[in-house]
Image (cartoon, helix red, strand yellow):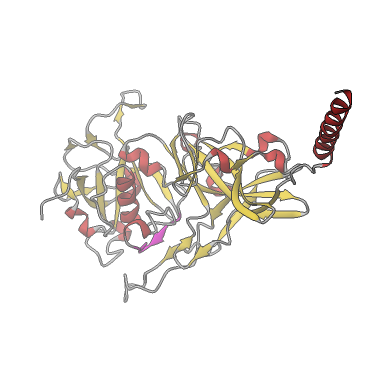
Amino acid sequence: MPSVTRHAAGPLLVGLVLAASTVIICAAPAAAAITPRKVLIVGQVDPDGPWTTAPTEARIDQAPRLAVVLVARETHGRRSRTVYIADDAVKPLRIRGRRIADARRRGWDTLNGAAVRWSTVEPHAWADAEKMIFHSNVSVDPRTWGKWIGYTPITYFATPLGPFDATPAARIVLARVIPADPEVARRPAEFEGLGTIRYRVEVRHGGRILASPGPEATSRTGIDRAVHRVTIRRDDSYVGHLTGLMLVPEIFGSAGKGRRHQTERYVGADCADVLTGGARSAGMRHIDYSNVARMTQDARRITGVVALDDAGNPPEPIEGVREGDIIRIDYGGALSGHTPRSFDHVAVLYEDRSLRADGTFGPANGRLEGFDRVIHMGHPRLVVVPLADQSPALIDVLRWRETPRRR
């Protein structure tokens, strides 16, 4: 019996030793290789909202943010798949409308030492700044006025917002509209932070620099949608949405269909299209891009044609106006016959004011007067000025139809 016990115990002991040896010499799983391929910018408007590659559009009282996301290829043996490197705070994450699952996310610790640099991307407002020539898709020669001549080239420039930064704070920034153009930088304080600007981000890692699309990403109709757009508006009113189009350059005869229209893409606009673009942004999608003369198809007239004197005042008070009303303008005086059209220009009532006895401005009084302010496409971008600046002139006043007109 003892010998049987010894022989039984021997193989068992050897098996345990072999099993232990097997555990000891087994190699650890090979780490996956991460290869960055592309850089994206995502934006978030509400603190609990999604981060998305769609344009970042917000009100001035919100605090929208931008974050950098790296699209990378993760390789493990013969298997390979796309993963997204982003901060934990960038959640939920949607890339071109598709939600990115946690299993596809990776942290920035997979790329030790990665540094980030942000830049703003802006258009050159003038086609020729020295000669102060604005962009135009159509002829402005009186003999061929309005004839299509092709999409005007628009060039863009980038302005770095600082050096490369490897700290986590550099990867998530506020989405702000701060133009580098010194002419715009001098605009009144009430308009600071309003309008449209675009962003590029660069990521430096391992001797390489990857960048999101920037000023070079253009086509014949303007900058590409892939260049991340930030649009900040005053509020959710029609006039508020118009302020989101500030800094968009003037393009006389801006063109395109629906979502591809240059104004819809915040590439550029003329005097009529910018007003239409603001209305469509405010939810009035039934309003079509057209021209000053044809605006009565989507807006109703609330006055007849009235003459304004040099101070912008009519012979009799124009009653019942309100912020957002459309003012079509046929210039008089030295600009009489400025264009071959029945109306030369169009603006929107930005601020209805009253005049106090002490000479200061008071609240709205429902009257259209020369000291009321209008917003319109000037040369070379949207401006807010007193109505008197557009006088003397013949005008009429229109108001957008909030629902489609029966044809």
Q: Quadrant of the N terminus?
A: top right
Identify which residue, 46 or 303, lies in the foreground.
46
User: Is residue 220 shown left or right of residue 370?
Assistant: right
Residue 401: percent from left, percent from top: 18, 45
Q: Residue at x 49, y 67 (%)?
A: 153
Looking at this view, is 385 or 168 the one in front?
Answer: 168
| Position in image of residue 165 (x %, y %) | 72, 41
Task: State the extent of the magenta-drawn residues as a range.
Answer: 249-256
Name the side, left or right, on which 357 lies relative to 397: right
Q: Left of 277 or right of it: where is 325?
A: left
Q: Is residue 175 visible?
A: no
Residue 352 image-quadrant placement: top left
Magenta stretch: residue 255 in it?
A: yes
Asked whether residue 18 appears in the rendered view, the answer is: yes
Counting from the top left corner in percent of width and height, residue 295 is at 22, 54
Question: Quick one: which residue is furthest to the bottom in this view?
Answer: 143
Q: Quadrant of residue 351?
A: top left
Residue 289 at x, y percent in the picture: 28, 57
